Image (cartoon, coloured by chain):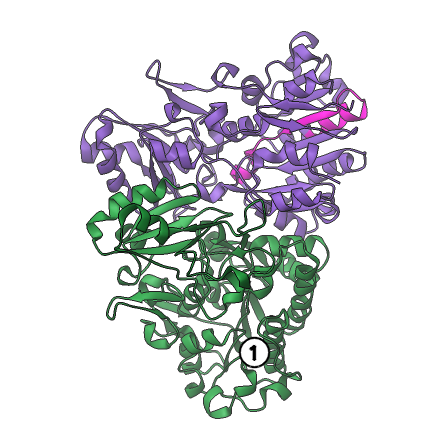
Chain colours: A purple, B green
Amino acid sequence: MSAVFEANGRRYAPPDRPIVVICIDGCGDEYLSVSISRGRMPHMERMARNGYRGLVRGVVPSFTNVNNASIVTGVPPAINGVSGNFFLNPETGEEVMMNSPEYRRCGTLLTAAADAGRKVAFITAKEKLRTVLGDGIVERGGIVFSSEKVDEARYETHGIDDAESIIGRPRPEIYSADASVYVLEAGAALLAQQKADFLYLSLTDYMQHKFAPEEAESLEFHAAMDEQIGRFLDTDCIMAATADHGMNAKNRDDGTPNVIYVESLLTAKFGEGCRVICPVTDPYVVHHGSLGALVMVHLDKPAMAGEVANFLLEQDGVTEVLTRDHAAAKLELPADRIGDLVVLSGRSVVLGKTPEYHNLKVLHQGLRSHGGRYEEMVPLVISHPLKSEYIRKAQGDPRNFDVFDFACNGTC
Amino acid sequence: MSAVFEANGRRYAPPDRPIVVICIDGCGDEYLSVSISRGRMPHMERMARNGYRGLVRGVVPSFTNVNNASIVTGVPPAINGVSGNFFLNPETGEEVMMNSPEYRRCGTLLTAAADAGRKVAFITAKEKLRTVLGDGIVERGGIVFSSEKVDEARYETHGIDDAESIIGRPRPEIYSADASVYVLEAGAALLAQQKADFLYLSLTDYMQHKFAPEEAESLEFHAAMDEQIGRFLDTDCIMAATADHGMNAKNRDDGTPNVIYVESLLTAKFGEGCRVICPVTDPYVVHHGSLGALVMVHLDKPAMAGEVANFLLEQDGVTEVLTRDHAAAKLELPADRIGDLVVLSGRSVVLGKTPEYHNLKVLHQGLRSHGGRYEEMVPLVISHPLKSEYIRKAQGDPRNFDVFDFACNGTC
């Protein structure tokens, strides 16, 4: 299985042992720090001690699809085309979910690995990620399914029959800690049964949206994940863990969500002609009510961009306003799939469209969300010591979408 | 000693036990994470386990004087006036060091605590911090000295005679790990001998400028600090630890510093009339060669600000350019003590003036520095559990300059 392959301009030469990459959805580094300090992640601590732990820069917008797309392609959205969960399609003028591979502008390293003979498994918690990023793997002999719909997995469409019995447990509820733990269990089962040797396991941030690092439920969740991580560390695999984005509380002192309704503000100030897109929008509204720390503003009159940008920057809680060109250059985004303006908010603030657009009733314990700068930096933990050139790389400006490079090429 | 006091609009009601706040200069959170995972900071780990560990937002410019001034005043630079180590004095047109209390626009909570009857000790590694922030304490019966010049401490001027014999060791070299460890030893000695019960201990980032978290020298340094931290935890004090800023490597692939010389660029493009100030500049040039991730640009023709900003934003490695007004509002800076533009660079990039201005020969092992967004978030660790209202506060947008509030008012 000594398979060397290339994908999107990078060469991957993984060693002859299983490669396991996990993306802990919404895992701000403080979740690991607190869980480790409280003795709830001994295996993660062992991984950091024996290998490497540091911070890597994710992609802003710090959303799930954007970062998972970057991780499986190894390139930023400017190349892979995935700029949000949700965007304004310039070809149709419609607001649509990026929920199929046609929105992606390049192939994945997972299919390249499969072409090179690796037994690839891509297991997600959220079905949406399977549909956006999982194409081409089953055709190449690999396995792709989500814990959300593991019961629908069939050999013809998912590369596996009877997944639940192979894993040994029935489908978990998607709004649960178990939806993530199950993905790790599934990966460990496929690895143990030699059904896969090149795994990408992408979890869900349901728990991180609900609980801060020090809350009992979060500590329990991290302990449950850690138990599974221990199973991988007991094999001869190389394991790397990163995150798609961090997570911060976004509430006012009274506990209600700290929202700036950007389209309402702009309509009141400038009249009709300013359309706000919330790219965090996805089917899992219970997580965030479609409220994140970054929105796109589309202007009927793009020449107003400067004036609108200045007005938005004057709002408390707005931290950055980038024009389309600057956002494309600085955040490495596809210029045709972002707004005339890209607006970011502070650590405890989210941006919305209008009060009517968002259903805050789905948020039971206040809002925790992501999307901006304060959820940009995420952990990278690798089970084995790094080669000197990768130590240097880690001390530069490494990205979360370098994680397969580190796992395949970076360890001693 | 049940002393309630106010300073700069905040009320502090510390309990009847010693308060010890330490500012670990340059302590990006990953220094703690790596040191703890490798078993080198058992006392810090115990502190996090029994109390609280999380992230707080420092002040940008993420420099030492700026953040220490904010910590001892409890307010941001917009109020305390300290916008850098070095600035262009608009009254004189001269570039000057902010090296005396006259540059500060409000009093410190340290003198307020002393007025309320607390036995205050402010011990720094760097002499510069003593001179900028230590005024008024000795007159109120407190103690102020630096490890850099501990041998010059006299009762009349520093509130203490024979400091070296009280601490039990002679003055350390300023360019050393020991310069920081000595500050902690001094604090522990004053506490043990009941010479102080309200301590602010501010270290130096010499080691962080030289070594990444996983390097042996850094691990040794953190273990030595941790031994002292254990001495405090063995008393009945409340201890809080934070940092002034984080630290990142700033080098190209070939190991040379990754610098954008902003004044050179602007002069080539726009001719004379653009003056760049590097506010990281201080007497400790071996640390950073006056290269940081934020510079001020002063324009002879301020009306050119928009054009110059756009040009600078086009440069690879420049991440943000704020006008004076936006910087004053967003970063809470004094508008009269910053440039017409405030320019920030990326995680692995620093900004300089001209190649002639900076002496890179002082940097022996590549450059590690700070000053921008990627050094903004820092740890907050507190020895005791937080009250519920401070848990909520910690989950909002807490600042490093809230550290005395957390220590005095926040624990159960």
Q: Quadrant of residue A331?
A: top left
Mark 1 lies on a secondary structure that is loop
The magenta span reads A184-210
Q: Is residue B166 visible?
A: yes
| Amino acid found under the numbered disc labelled 1 | Ser
Q: Is residue A146 visible?
A: no
- Look at 31% across and 29% down and name the residue there: A340
Question: Relative to residue A265, is residue B221 drawn left or right?
Answer: right
- Viewer-side residue, B385 vs A336: A336
Q: Dividing the image into 4 quarters, which one contains the C terminus of chain B?
A: bottom right
- Viewer-side residue, A330 vs A270: A330
Does the stretch in magenta take in A380? no
Mark 1 closeness class: few <14, some 14–19, many ≥20 residues within 10 Å? many
Question: Relative to residue A64, is residue A338 drawn left or right?
Answer: left
Q: Position of residue B319 (x, y in %)?
A: 41, 44
Rendered view: A26 above or below B219: above
Q: Position of residue A328 (x, y in %)?
A: 40, 31
- Viewer-side residue, B255 vs B409: B255
**Residue pointed to by mark 1:** B147
Q: Quadrant of residue A355?
A: top left
Q: Residue furthest top?
A: A156
Question: Relative to residue A42, is residue B269 drawn left or right?
Answer: left
Does the stretch in magenta take in A205? yes
Question: Relative to residue B343, is residue B402 drawn left or right?
Answer: right
Report the label total. 1
Q: Position of residue B25 (x, y in %)?
A: 53, 64
Q: Chain of mark 1?
A: B
Q: Quadrant of residue A95?
A: top left
Q: Position of residue B275 (x, y in %)?
A: 30, 57
